[in-house]
């Protein structure tokens, strides 16, 4: 579960990064939100799961 | 990775390639390198700069591989390895130097974060100074209180930085009129090739000489060691400096904060700088505290860290985020550190015939080797005096040659009599 959140968050933040940097107007603003959301999800996941752990 | 500080890492505690390389890559990923790339792009053509990045990182990879092989074969930390050439007290000199270098990076990065806030909120110089002081103190508080969250945010910051760096470079190229226009950009030709290589070396010469050994003593094979060094320096460090150069060439300025805000990338700028500067800087301060507390065992780590935070706050008032200050630090590092590396390398590969004794906890060392210190200073002198070739290489070769010559001539042994016989049957074996 937390592994999924950690890795899924990375995918979300990656999409958000490109939307935010390469988009314009509403798309860029949405990208900012997606980027922050991805960082949040990934941080939540990594709080409970890390690559060395077995969880 | 703080185990086995005073002994060799045993074979059964060695770790896999990715476990070591991921930590090392995370450590290499710093925004000051990107800033240096942007600054160098203003002073030379992009093509020449890419060659300088490649040559500089190739040199760093060779140095770090040679140092890491010593650490892998012996299982010792850099501080322990230094005892064989500098003596047990003399080995504290590189430790103190390490602390001051980390302090330098701490001040630069904390000031950069304060500058980011000042630019965004259009603060006056007084409030910019205040923002930099608060950054120094606030980042330090996290280092004082917590270490677990630093590893969590560290795991998030690596992919975030990779993606944001790529996306920012693409955006800068787009706004700069396409790749052809950016590639054709040529700076004011104020910097030559040798200087640029020296600056690239300065970004990681200390880490490539010292910290990398501390990571790679956990390696399982010499192939892993070399592959890890190449991944961290030749690929990742080249990538970061290269992205900085492209963004700098496209925007035609060195100030990373101004560049990102100029492109309208406010949220990405805050995310990029917060995840990177905040985490690496807290780790920097934590590391300085640990190092100095081992040098000054009677003073508590907290007291040392509070002292460093106050000192850093005062230093941040000199605006160290400006490219001139960053370049001065990189140039200084590129001639001060290589002689130290040269002495350690020649000591292991030539004087000790690639085999340090095992069981260092049983060995008794002389306090200080004055010849090693003399050779180090002479190496720095060589770099300053000779204006031919690479200053870093001159410094390293000069110190190594002089050290080997004096040690052979004087027959000085750094181990006290009896130690060698005691551990003679326990020579370090390669796996």
Image: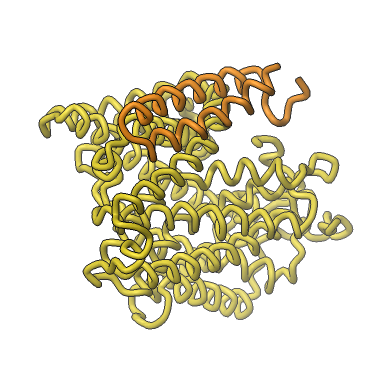
Residue B104 location in percent, x, y?
A: 36, 45
Q: Colour of chain A?
A: orange
Q: Which of the chains is yellow?
A: B
Does residue B111 appear left or right of residue B375 in this picture?
left
Q: Quadrant of the C terminus of chain B?
A: bottom right
Decide which of B365, B33 is in the foreground and name it: B33
Note whether residue B292 is visible. Answer: no
Relative placement, left or right, of B327 versus B161 is: left
In the rendered view, tell whether residue B281 sits above or below residue B387: above
Q: Residue at x 39, y 40 (%)?
A: A22
Quarter of the image with the N terminus of chain B in it = top right
* Residue located 63% across and 28% down the image: A7
- Looking at the image, residue B103 sits to the left or right of residue B301; the answer is left
> Relative to B345, does residue B368 appear above or below in the rendering?
above
The quarter of the picture where residue A35 lies is: top left
- Give how far across and how far down residue B385 sits, in percent: 33, 78
Does residue B33 sit above or below A40 in this rendering? Answer: below
């Amino acid at each position: 579960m937390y592994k999924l959140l950690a890795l899924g968050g990375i995918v979300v933040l990656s999409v958000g990064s490109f939307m935010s940097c390469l988009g314009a107007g509403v798309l860029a603003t949405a990208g900012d939100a997606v980027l922050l959301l991805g960082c949040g999800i990934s941080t939540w996941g990594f709080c409970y799961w890390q690559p060395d752990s077995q969880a | 990775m703080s185990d086995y500080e005073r002994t060799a890492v045993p074979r059964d505690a060695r770790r896999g390639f990715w476990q070591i390389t991921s930590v090392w890559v995370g450590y290499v990923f710093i925004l000051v390198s990107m800033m240096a790339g942007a600054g160098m792009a203003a002073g030379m053509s992009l093509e020449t700069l890419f060659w300088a990045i490649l040559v500089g990182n190739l040199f760093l990879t060779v140095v770090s591989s040679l140092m890491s092989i010593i650490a892998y074969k012996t299982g010792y930390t850099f501080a322990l390895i230094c005892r064989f050439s500098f003596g047990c007290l003399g080995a504290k000199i590189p430790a103190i130097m390490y602390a001051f270098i980390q302090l330098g990076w701490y001040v630069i990065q904390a000031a950069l974060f304060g500058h980011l806030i000042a630019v965004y909120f259009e603060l006056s110089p007084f409030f910019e100074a205040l923002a930099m002081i608060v950054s120094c103190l606030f980042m330090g508080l996290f280092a004082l209180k917590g270490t677990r969250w630093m590893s969590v945010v560290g795991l998030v910051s690596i992919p975030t930085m990779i993606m944001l760096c790529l996306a920012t470079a693409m955006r800068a190229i787009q706004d700069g009129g396409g790749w052809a226009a950016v590639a054709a950009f040529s700076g004011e030709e104020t910097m030559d090739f040798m200087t640029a290589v020296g600056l690239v070396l300065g970004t990681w010469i200390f880490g490539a000489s010292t910290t990398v050994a501390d990571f790679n003593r956990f390696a399982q094979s010499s192939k892993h060691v070399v592959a890890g060094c190449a991944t961290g320096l030749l690929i990742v460090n080249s990538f970061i400096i290269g992205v900085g150069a492209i963004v700098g060439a496209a925007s035609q300025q060195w100030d990373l904060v101004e560049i990102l805000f100029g492109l309208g990338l406010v949220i990405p700028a805050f995310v990029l700088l917060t995840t990177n500067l905040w985490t690496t800087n807290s780790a920097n301060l934590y590391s300085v505290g640990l190092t100095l507390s081992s040098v000054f065992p009677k003073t508590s780590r907290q007291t040392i860290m509070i002292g460093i935070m106050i000192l850093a706050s005062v230093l941040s008032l000199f605006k160290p985020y400006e490219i001139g200050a960053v370049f001065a630090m990189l140039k200084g590092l590129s001639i001060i550190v290589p002689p130290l590396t040269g002495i350690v390398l020649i000591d292991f590969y030539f004087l000790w015939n690639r085999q340090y004794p095992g069981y260092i906890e049983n060995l008794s060392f002389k306090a200080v080797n004055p010849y090693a210190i003399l050779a180090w200073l002479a190496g720095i002198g060589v770099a300053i005096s000779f204006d031919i070739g690479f200053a870093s290489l001159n410094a390293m070769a000069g110190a190594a040659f002089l050290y080997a010559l004096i040690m052979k001539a004087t027959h000085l042994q750094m181990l006290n009599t009896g130690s060698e016989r005691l551990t003679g049957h326990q020579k370090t074996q390669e796996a």
